[in-house]
Image (spheres, rainbow, N blue to C red):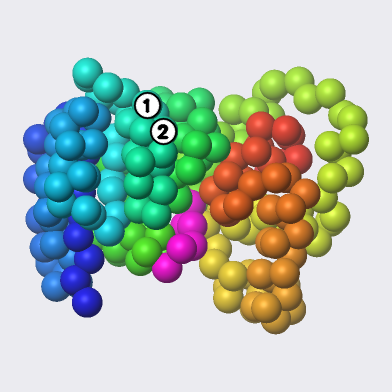
Amino acid sequence: MTYKVLIVDDHWLVREGLKLILETDDRFQVVGEAENGEIALELAAVAQPDIVLLDLNMPVLSGLETLKRMKAQYPAIPVIILTTYNEDERMLESLMNGAKGYLLKDTSREHLIRTIDSALRGETLLQPEITERVFRLHARETYQAGTDAQLLTDKETQILRAVARGFRSKEIAGDIGISERTVKAHLTNIYNKLGVDSRSQAVALAIEKGLLQL
């Protein structure tokens, strides 16, 4: 099966680099390139991509606003955020608004493909180095302990921390000695407690609430 990819970034070199990498895998076809959010939304309507790679920092229409409109108009299309090290707050907000994950623009081919594959399966693969940077950012902020402080059990916190560091359910299960099915059951409980419906949103909200610590 061939998956259609839409690349949205205002830098031609970034778009070209991603396109060259994706073209090394016969499963992916780049069906559109956009330099801003308005063009991206127009292309999405025509090309009907299976996945979107979206820059946060763009002219005309910001990546975050593009994401919001994209999820409103095409909720079934997974969106992966392309980010740099100085976009922590916007990256966190993008996860809360439905992004399936995020990648550094200089990520390796292996991690790019792995993240796309996860998103297409309906999963989320978070890049550990970015997540840890966000952890450090929010660790400096004051968190007032309240009912949220005990919202997650120790096991749920352990599993969500592993998710935040980029591990998949199968890897988490093997690491802590439980079945993959049990891991997924814990994740369902986490989603219900936090009022979210994806790994990325769960991680983002847990970070925002101070529920996850390094």
Q: Nearer the viewer, residue 78 or 177?
A: 78
- At numbered mark 2, what does the secondary structure look like: helix, strand or loop? helix
Q: Quadrant of the N terminus?
A: bottom left
Q: Position of residue 68 (x, y in %)?
A: 41, 33
Residue pictured at 59% horizontal, 27% vertical:
137
Q: Which residue is mark 2?
A: 68
Mark 2 residue type = Lys
Q: Which residue is mark 1?
A: 65
Residue pictured at 40% horizontal, 41% vertical:
71
Q: Is residue 21 visible in this depiction of the protein?
A: no
Residue pictured at 21% horizontal, 28% vertical:
38
Q: Is residue 2 left or right of residue 193?
A: left
Q: How many marks?
A: 2
Please tell me whether residue 145 belongs to the stretch shown in magenta: no
Dominant SS of magenta comes to loop
Mark 1 residue type = Glu
Q: Nearer the viewer, residue 94 or 48?
A: 48
Label 2–label 1 contact, CB within 8 A: yes
Q: Position of residue 51 (x, y in %)?
A: 29, 55
Give residue 176's mark: none
Please tell me whether residue 122 belongs to the stretch shown in magenta: yes
Tell me if mark 2 has few (under 14), some (14-19) or many (20+) residues whose alpha carbon lies within 10 angstroms of its own: some
Bounds of the magenta span? 121-127
The relative height of residue 19 versus residue 117 in the rendered view (above or below) is above
